[in-house]
Image: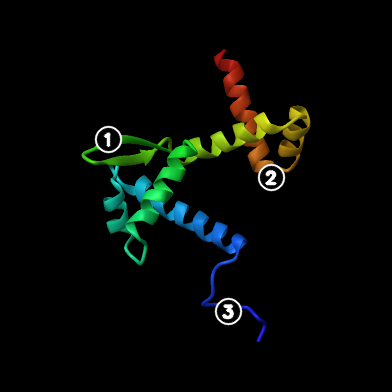
Amino acid sequence: MDGHDPAGPLQEGERRLANGRREAEVLAVLRSASLALTPRQVLDRIGGDLAYSTVVTILTRLYDKDVLTRAAHGRAFAYAPATDEQGFAARKMHRAMEEAQDREGVLMRFVDDLSSGDEALLRRLLGDLDAGR
């Protein structure tokens, strides 16, 4: 035996990973919906062994991270994604840039690490922006 009990409590890193998976699962449900969903509707679509309170906690955390919007819906809230998948990725990139002390260095490293196809796409997009100004 390795001393790890698979049925035992989750360690901190495992708990964080499980929470991240759950957040992704909840977000996928909301993205696939045509309207905002209440916690009960999210729970019904996910199924499985999640507790209602767990779904509420996940939705609240995603809302607090500005990933979701919410509106009153009876005695609960109905939640929807704040933006689409491309918007989320762009927001992450903006946050990373805001946190960087050497923005030029970060951008240089980013461009250096792009595939040749992505670099060509970025150059074309920047050219299109310049042409539109």
Q: Residue at the location (46% across, 38% down)?
A: 64
How many marks the image carries: the answer is 3
> Considering only vertical position in the picture, is 40 above or below 111?
below
Question: Left or right: where does residue 7 sit relative to residue 98?
Answer: left
Closer to the observer: label 3 or label 2?
3
> Considering only vertical position in the picture, is 53 above or below 8?
above
Question: Left or right: where does residue 36 sit relative to residue 121?
Answer: left
Q: Earlier in the sequence, mark 2 or mark 1?
A: 1
Q: Amino acid at mark 2?
A: Ser
The location of residue 47, given as percent across then percent down, is 32, 63
The location of residue 90, given as percent across then percent down, is 55, 35
Work out how far the residue at label 2 is from the one at label 1, CA to CA, in angstroms. 45 Å
The location of residue 129, given as percent across then percent down, is 58, 20
Question: Left or right: where does residue 41 sit relative to residue 86?
Answer: left
* Badge 1 element: strand
Q: Earlier in the sequence, mark 3 or mark 2?
A: 3
**Residue 67 visible, this orientation:** no
Outermost residue, bottom side: 1
Identify the mark at residue 72; answer none if there is no mark: 1
Q: Residue at the location (54% across, 70% down)?
A: 9
* Badge 3 element: loop
Q: Residue at the location (58% across, 23% down)?
A: 128
Locate the N terminus and report the quarter of the image it occupies: bottom right
- Image quadrant where residue 110 sits: top right
**Which residue is denoted by mark 3 in the rendering?**
5
* Badge 2 element: loop
Work out how far the residue at label 3 is from the one at label 2, CA to CA, in angstroms. 43 Å
Q: Amino acid at mark 1?
A: Ala
Q: Amino acid at mark 3?
A: Asp
**Which residue is denoted by mark 2 in the rendering?**
115
